[in-house]
Image (tube, rainbow, N blue to C red):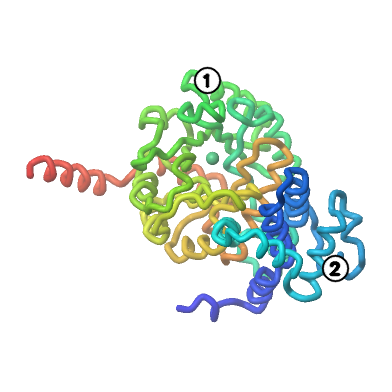
C-alpha cells in the first residue's frame, strides 16, 4: 500500500511544512558558507547562526524576515540576514552560491549536505507536535517518561534524584537512568561495582518518590564491531533493561547490517539506541539495510529508539516510517545529560508523529504493567526455539 495515499489532510499538510521548512534550509546554507570561511572567527559565527536558526527559534525565518525582526535574535548578524532574506525572497542564496563556487571542492560540500538529511528544525518540530493528526498518533499527552538519560554516574551533570524531580515537574511518571557501561571510558562508563551502588541509590529515590515517579535501572551498552555487547549476559541481568547503542565505526561506508542485526538478537536488549549514530553536519553513522535490522528487532520485541538529541534525531521520520512498516515498537528518548535536555523528547515525539507512529507502539506510553511485562520479556531474551536453532546451526558448522 502506498503510504502517501493513506495520509490524512493534516498529515499531508505537515509533510508539506517539512518540505518547505526554510529554517532548516537556511541553517544548511549557513553551514555551507561556514565551511568555506578561511578564518576561524567567521566560521564559528556562521555555525552559531545556523544552530540558532535550526534549533533555538520557534518562529519561521520567513515571518522574521518579513517583519524585519531576524536581527533582533541574539548573534544573528547582517551577513546571516542577507543570506536568509535571499532564501526567503528568491528560494536560494546567490551569495552562498558564489562563495561555494569560488571555494571549489564540491564533494566536500555535498558530503556535508548528506549529513543533514531529515532533520527537523525547532520550528517544524513544534508544528509536528501541534498538528491535528488524530487521537491514535503518539503525542506529548500520552507520554509517560523518558527512557534514556545520563546522570553523574557517567557523563551527565545531574543526580538521579534531581532527574526524577524534573520528570515529575514535566508531568512524567517514569524515567529510565541509562548511564554508560564500562566499555565507554571516554563517557566515564560505570564499572559493575558502581552499577551495584547506583542500583541502591535508585531504590532510595523510588522510595522517596513513593510511586509518583518510578525510576528504572537501565544501562547504555556498546555494540561492538561484531554486534555483541561490551556487557556479558550476567552483567546485563543486573539492570532492568539494556539499551544497545553504536558508539564506534560511525564513519564507514561499508555495510554493517550483520552487526546491527546481531545486536538486537542479544539477550537482555530492550532498545536499539540511536541506531545510526549519526551527527548533524559531521558524520553519517552506520550504513545498513535498515529494513532487515528493523524486521529482526520486531521479531525480538526490541524497540527502535528515536533519539531526540538535536544533533542526533536518530532514527529520523523517514527511517521511523520503515520501522513502522516492519511492525517495530518505539522508544522516544531524550538522551539527556542535563535537566534542560529532557526537552529533547519533543523532537523524538515530533519525528514519531511525522512517521505516523501510534501511541500503542511506543513503550514510553504503555501503562506500567504492560511496560514492565515487556521489560521482563526482554530479560528472557530470544525465544527458546530460536536459541535451539542457533545452537543446532553452530553444531552443524562445527561438524562440517
Ligand atoms: Zn549513546
Nearest to the observer: residue 62 or residue 149: 62
Q: Does residue 240 lie above or below 300 as drawn?
A: above
Residue at the front extreme, as displayed: 102
Q: Does residue 173 lie above or below 181 as drawn?
A: below
Kindly tell me whether residue 380 is visible in this rendering.
Answer: no
Disc 1 under 8 Å from ligand 1? The reply is no
Residue at the left extreme, as displayed: 400
Give the image quarter of residue 125. Answer: bottom right
Where is residue 370? Give x, y as percent.
50, 48
- Identify residue for label 2: 63
Where is residue 392? Give x, y as percent.
16, 45
Residue under the point 68% across and 54% down: 36
Kindly tell me whether residue 398 is visible in this rendering.
Answer: yes
Residue under the point 68% across and 34% down: 164
Circle 2: element type: helix
Residue at the bottom extreme, as displayed: 5
Residue under the point 20% across and 48% down: 389
- Identify residue for label 1: 194
Nearest to the observer: residue 376 or residue 234: 234
Nearest to the observer: residue 287 or residue 335: 287
Q: Does residue 349 lie above or below 195 as drawn?
A: below
Circle 1: element type: helix
- Which class describes the residues within 10 Å of circle 1: few (<14), some (14-19), or many (20+)? few
Cα separation between marks 2 and 1: 51 Å
Where is residue 82? Give x, y as percent.
83, 64
Task: State which image quarter holds ligand 1.
Answer: top right
Q: Quadrant of the N terminus?
A: bottom left
Where is residue 339? Give x, y as percent.
72, 37
- Which class describes the residues within 10 Å of circle 2: few (<14), some (14-19), or many (20+)? few
Q: Given this view, does label 2 or label 1 mark the residue nearer the observer?
A: 2
Q: Earlier in the sequence, mark 2 or mark 1?
A: 2
Q: Marks 1 and 2: in contact by CB < 8 Å?
A: no
Amino acid at each position: 500500500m502506498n503510504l502517501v495515499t493513506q495520509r490524512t489532510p493534516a498529515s499531508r499538510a505537515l509533510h508539506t511544512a517539512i518540505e518547505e521548512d526554510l529554517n532548516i534550509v537556511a541553517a544548511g546554507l549557513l553551514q555551507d558558507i561556514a565551511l568555506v570561511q578561511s578564518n576561524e572567527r567567521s566560521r564559528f559565527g556562521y555555525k552559531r547562526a545556523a544552530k540558532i536558526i535550526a534549533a533555538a527559534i520557534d518562529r519561521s525565518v520567513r515571518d522574521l524576515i518579513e517583519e524585519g525582526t531576524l536581527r533582533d535574535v541574539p548573534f544573528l548578524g547582517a551577513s546571516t540576514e542577507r543570506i536568509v532574506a535571499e532564501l526567503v525572497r528568491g528560494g536560494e542564496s546567490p551569495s552562498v552560491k558564489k562563495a561555494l563556487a569560488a571555494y571549489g571542492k564540491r564533494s566536500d560540500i555535498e558530503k556535508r549536505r548528506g549529513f543533514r538529511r531529515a532533520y527537523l528544525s525547532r520550528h517544524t518540530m513544534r508544528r509536528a507536535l501541534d498538528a491535528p493528526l488524530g487521537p491514535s498518533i503518539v503525542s506529548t499527552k500520552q507520554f509517560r517518561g523518558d527512557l534514556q538519560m545520563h546522570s553523574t554516574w557517567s557523563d551527565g551533570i545531574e543526580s538521579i534524584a534531581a532527574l526524577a524531580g524534573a520528570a515529575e515537574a514535566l508531568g512524567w511518571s517514569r524515567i529510565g537512568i541509562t548511564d554508560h557501561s564500562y566499555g565507554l571510558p571516554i563517557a566515564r562508563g560505570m564499572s559493575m561495582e558502581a552499577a551495584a551502588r547506583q542500583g541502591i541509590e535508585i531504590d532510595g529515590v523510588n522510595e522517596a518518590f513513593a510511586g509518583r515517579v518510578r525510576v528504572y535501572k537501565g544501562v547504555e551498552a556498546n555494540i561492538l564491531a561484531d554486534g555483541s555487547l561490551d556487557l556479558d549476559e550476567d552483567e546485563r541481568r543486573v539492570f532492568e533493561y539494556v539499551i544497545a547503542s553504536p558508539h564506534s565505526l560511525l564513519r564507514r561506508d561499508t555495510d554493517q547490517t550483520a552487526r546491527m542485526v546481531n545486536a538486537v538478537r542479544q539477550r537482555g536488549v530492550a532498545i536499539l539506541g540511536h541506531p545510526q549514530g549519526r551527527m548533524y553536519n559531521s558524520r553519517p553513522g552506520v550504513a545498513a539495510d535498515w529494513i532487515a535490522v528493523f524486521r529482526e528487532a520486531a521479531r525480538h520485541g526490541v524497540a527502535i529508539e528515536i533519539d531526540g538529541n538535536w544533533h542526533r534525531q536518530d532514527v529520523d521520520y523517514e527511517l521511523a516510517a520503515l520501522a513502522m512498516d516492519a511492525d517495530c515498537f518505539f522508544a522516544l528518548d531524550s538522551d539527556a545529560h542535563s535537566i534542560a535536555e529532557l526537552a529533547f523528547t519533543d523532537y523524538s515525539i515530533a519525528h514519531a508523529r511525522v512517521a505516523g507512529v501510534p501511541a500503542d507502539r511506543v513503550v514510553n506510553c504503555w501503562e506500567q504493567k504492560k511496560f514492565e511485562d515487556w521489560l521482563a520479556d526482554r530479560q528472557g531474551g530470544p525465544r527458546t526455539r530460536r536459541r535451539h536453532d542457533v545452537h543446532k546451526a553452530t553444531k552443524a558448522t562445527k561438524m562440517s
